[in-house]
Amino acid sequence: MNDIVRRYTYRIQWSDEDGEYVATVLEFSGLSWLASNELEALQGLHMVVEETVKDLQEDGERVPTPINDKHYSGKFMLRITPEEHRRLALAAAEQHVSINRYAEMKLAEA
């Protein structure tokens, strides 16, 4: 198996609708594989992802970078309304923390 295929972010969960396990991969939102057990679902999806990566490479197209291989600075910009900004400032002040710390706490709860 291609090393990059192993580094992608996989999720396996039961699908009541299909009556089987469904494996998905975050870096390829359109790909999935159904199987009667988790291992078969993951193995099937690995094959599909490997073929997809191979096809992309042969066609000279960009292969998605695994999420865990990306560098994250710890910063991101979020635009909100002035009213929401004011509400967050008040809530942060009530907690005796900065707006940044308050937003971080709320995101961690989600």
Image: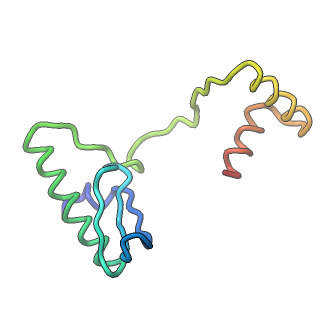
Residue 107 left/right relative to 91: left
On the image, the x and y values in percent for residue 84 come to: 75, 26
Q: Nearer the viewer, residue 36 or 3?
A: 36
> Which image quadrant is residue 42 in?
bottom left
Image side of residue 48 versus residue 80, left or right: left
| Furthest residue toward left | 58
Q: Residue furthest bottom?
A: 37
Horizontal side, residue 51 vs residue 94: left or right: left
Residue ID at (8%, 40%): 59
Classify 40 as above or below 97.
below
**In terms of depth relative to the viewer, which is nearer, 18 or 84?**
18
Q: Residue at x 32, y 44 (%)?
A: 65
Which quadrant of the rendered structure holds the N terminus?
A: bottom left
Q: Is residue 109 above or below residue 86?
A: below
Residue 90 locus on image (x, y percent): 87, 29
Q: Which residue corresponds to the image point at 29% horizontal and 43% vertical from the top-left? A: 64
Measuring from the top left, give residue 95's x and y in whole percent.
89, 40
Q: Position of residue 81 (x, y in %)?
A: 69, 21
Location of residue 40 by image quarter: bottom left
Residue drawn at the location 34% of the way across and 49% of the way down? 29
